[in-house]
Amino acid sequence: MTKKTSDKKTGQGNRLPVQDQPAKDWHWKDVLVALHKAGWSLRQLAIAHGYDDGAPLGEAARRPFPKAEGIIANALNLQPQVIWPSRYDTSGAPNRRRGPAPRRPDHFQANPIRITHKRNPQTVGAR
């Protein structure tokens, strides 16, 4: 079955099969509404899992955070990859880089020495 959508600019239809279109992450407001329908607020869910407030779980809205994603998904009786498909591969494993940061070359300086120009002591008080 194909889904037909029209392009406003060109007026031509998009005839991609529905299953070939990439899955999109849920909008954060949709996640919050689903939590409220399940009887949870973000703060209640966070406190139930040992956090002081809802801020740690809210991080899942802004960036990948596997622990928070799992807590939210469990409250909705879903898998995290259903809510955030872009953050997981087809096998359900997170598609994030893990491990230590890559080594930098030996010649790389993380904090280069800044050269500051000394003021001319004769002109400092002359203004």
Image: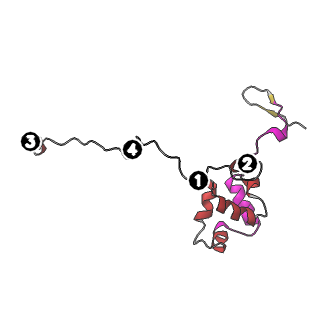
| Residue at image point 8% right, 41% down | 122
How far across and down, in percent of the image, does residue 68 sit?
Answer: 65, 62
Q: Which quarter of the rendering shows the N terminus?
A: top right
Q: Tell me the amino acid under the disc marked 3.
A: Gln
In space, the residues marked 2 and 3 are separated at their CA atoms by 66 Å
In space, the residues marked 4 and 1 are separated at their CA atoms by 22 Å
Q: Tell me the amino acid under the disc marked 4.
A: Gln
Q: Tell me the amino acid under the disc marked 2.
A: Asp
Q: Which residue is mark 4?
A: 109
In space, the residues marked 2 and 4 are separated at their CA atoms by 35 Å
Q: Is residue 82 left or right of residue 54?
A: right
Decide: is 42 above or below 81: below
Q: Tell me the amino acid under the disc marked 1.
A: Gly
Badge 1: residue crowd in 10 Å (few <14, some 14–19, many ≥20)? few
| Residue at image point 61% right, 60% down | 58
Element under label 1?
loop
Q: Which residue is mark 3?
A: 122
Q: Which residue is mark 1?
A: 99
Q: Is residue 48 left or right of residue 117?
A: right
| Region of the chain picked out in magenta, as a range | 14-42
How far across and down, in percent of the image, does residue 16 sit?
Answer: 82, 34
Q: Which residue is mark 2?
A: 89
